[in-house]
Image (tube, grey):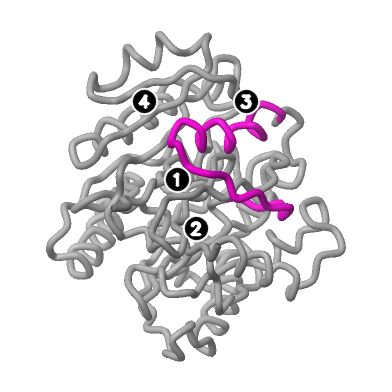
Amino acid sequence: MGYRMPAEWAPHTRTWMAWPPGGGAVQASGPDAVAAWAATANRIVDLEPVTMVAAPESFRQARGRLDPRITVIPTDLDDAWLRDSGPTFVVDDDGRLAAVNWVFNGWGQTVQNYAADARLGAFVSGQAQAPVVASSLVNEGGGIHVDGEGTVIVTETVQLHQARNPGWTKEQVEQELARTIGARTVIWLERGLMGDMQQFRPGIGTNGHVDVLAAFVRPGVVVVHGQPDETHHDHAVMAENVRRLREATDAQGRRLELVTVDAPRTVLEDGVAIDHSYVNFSFVNDGLVMCTFGDPVADQRARQTFEELFPSRQIVEVDARAIFRNGGGVHCITQQQPAVP
């Protein structure tokens, strides 16, 4: 069977999320982080169904903080980044749902405890009644962005990371992405934002996920993270990534149109710059959930960009500062299940 990952803006059956488990890093970072997970789910459920998996010891906490319309299912968890540890949903040639189960090894063994999360893809696939497409590629959902027409954007620092896929070549990665998600054109960016590359906070970051760098918003159009401050450590990172995007063509042979959304003002926590990015948004049915960062000017500028891109979608805001403090944004904690006939 051939498999294809639909574009994220295609209709969804639901959004999947994971509640931060008790004793985990997110819960330990403070109540505002847990509140951000709850706020994200409670806003999404106004637009589409939400299913939350929760560790048994955190089930009551999740049930008490979440909208009654949200389904909560108990299962063992190590962390709460379901985009990465959960499956990537695809459809086969007959339009039937399936789920790609990547190998998950804690973002290249960045964290020590990931055994439960490594089993999460199979658990969610079973709950969704989606046949499993097993993959030998160590990969995470935040490491790929697709246009639904055969184009995928990735980064060299993730799929070629030696603690993920030692010895793999670009050609081998591309073949596996073709088999599992229907990628016919793979656009390779150089690397991720410096904070996500764990340059400043060891143990926090993915070593370069694309979902804080660039995201398709429709075929041929990509929203990219902008860092106009030439003294900022991400200015050069994005200059090279943008150069590659401008030189690329998609699976249909089109040159890409780039829409830049500039970062908010730089925020320091304990002397470390947090690389906030508006690119880490999540599509939902008839809506888009965007991150905000307490910068009124930049937040409004980003919102205006999304309103212009999606005049028929409801733009929903979530204060994502506490999520980013733990290493990601609203896209990182959500995973869409595409609607099928």
> Is 125 or 325 nearer to us in this picture?
125
305 to 259, vertically: above or below: above
Closer to viewer: mark 3 or mark 2: 3
Residue under numbered circle 1: 329
The x, y position of residue 185, in whole percent, is: 56, 79
Q: Nearer the viewer, residue 156 or 77?
A: 77
Q: CA distance from mark 3 to mark 2?
A: 22 Å
| Mark nearer the N terminus (1 vs 4) | 4
Q: Position of residue 59 (x, y in %)?
A: 44, 12
Q: Residues within 10 Å of mark 4 (few under 14, many from 20)?
A: some
Asked whether disc 2 touches disc 1, contact meaning CB atoms under 8 Å apart, the reply is yes
Q: Nearer the viewer, mark 3 or mark 4?
A: 3
Q: Amino acid at mark 2?
A: Asp
- Of pointers 2 and 4, the one earlier in the residue sequence: 4
Provide the residue designation for mark 4: 35
> Visible in this render: residue 202?
no
SS at mark 4 in the image = helix
The disc, 1 or 3, on the residue closer to the chain's N-terminal end is 3
Residue at the image point whose x is 59% and y is 60% from the top: 180
Q: CA distance from mark 3 to mark 4?
A: 19 Å
Q: Which residue is mark 3?
A: 78
> From what the image shows, is residue 256 above or below residue 56?
below
User: Label 2: which residue?
Assistant: 211
Mark 2–mark 4 distance (CA, rounded to whole Å): 22 Å
Q: Does residue 148 appear left or right of residue 200 in this picture?
A: left
Q: Amino acid at mark 3?
A: Asp
Residue bounds of the magenta highlight: 115-140
**Between 308 and 234, which is closer to the camera in this rendering?**
308
Mark 1–mark 4 distance (CA, rounded to whole Å) = 13 Å
Which of label 1 and label 3 is nearer to you? 3
